[in-house]
Image: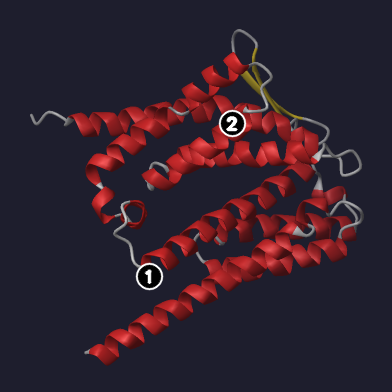
Amino acid sequence: MKRPSKLNILKWAARISSILLFLIWSGFFMEHLSWFRNPGDLPPATVFFGMFAHMSFLLGLLIAFRHEITGSILIIAGAIILFSRVGSPVAFLVMTGTALIPAALYIFHWWHTDREGSIFYRLISGKGDPVDQRLVFITAARWLLRLTAAFVAVLAVARYFGGESFLVWFDGSSWSMKMSEGFPRPLSMGLRELAAFVLAGLAVISAATAWIRECCGGTALCIFSGLYVIVSTGSAYPLVPSGVIAGALILLLGLYEHRINTAASAMTENAL
């Protein structure tokens, strides 16, 4: 039987550590969603920024499974910003150092396997051209807008579900699950409140779609977020103005990339 290579072992060590860290820190993330449930009592802007960093860190742990360098950048940036809020320098170093273990493993694996074909590597090594620079800009803008769309979805979910809607516990002999009283009940909502709830859900779906189909998802996110703003009564904060702006920018980015690809194809055909 063929023995796994050292690099393959390294990759799976990075993935296993990513899963463990995700399971640990996603629990804290879900708990902290309760801060955003009441539109009349929102936390300061620094908490929004910290939650965005926390979300970026968690998504980086998952994205690195498919895109090692992109996921590692998100892990590093998210972890440093998130744990910089810890008061003790020792705690910051310990927590950040632990969180960066998978990123270090992913980068080491990427450097020894895929770096030659990476646009990012060509740029940092001085081998890139203007086309590479444009592609890096598009890629960076895409990931930033994807994260923004994801955060819009997180805030929309937090508005209705908070961090206390599901309670799961073990009483020594069996597992139990309870739905808290704060869980939304669409059948008991008024027409306008129900419409806002449905539109918020459609905005969440649109934000997820934008990760795959930029033009379609961006257009839908812009439309549903805008309608949510119109229909909602004093609880539209998750989607004002971030949802509309993010949707419009995602749509424009998709159209811009389509234009670049069309021009490149035309130049190739003319050259032939």
Residue 210 visible to an observer of this rendering: yes
Nearer mark to the viewer, of 2 and 1: 1
Give the labeled residue for mark 1: 131
The amino acid at mark 1 is Val
Return the residue nearer the eye: 123 or 194: 123
Is residue 127 toward the left or the right of residue 191 in the image?
left
Instruction: Give x and y (percent) for residue 135.
Output: 42, 65
Is residue 1 toward the left or the right of residue 142 in the image?
left
Is residue 87 toward the left or the right of residue 1 in the image?
right
Residue 183 visible to an observer of this rendering: no
Q: Relative to 65, say whether 204 is above or below.
A: below
Write down the quadrant of residue 145 in the picture: bottom right
At 41% from the left and 34% from the top, the residue drawn is 103
Write down the quadrant of residue 82 in the picture: top right
Residue 26: assigned label? 2
Q: Residue furthest left?
A: 1
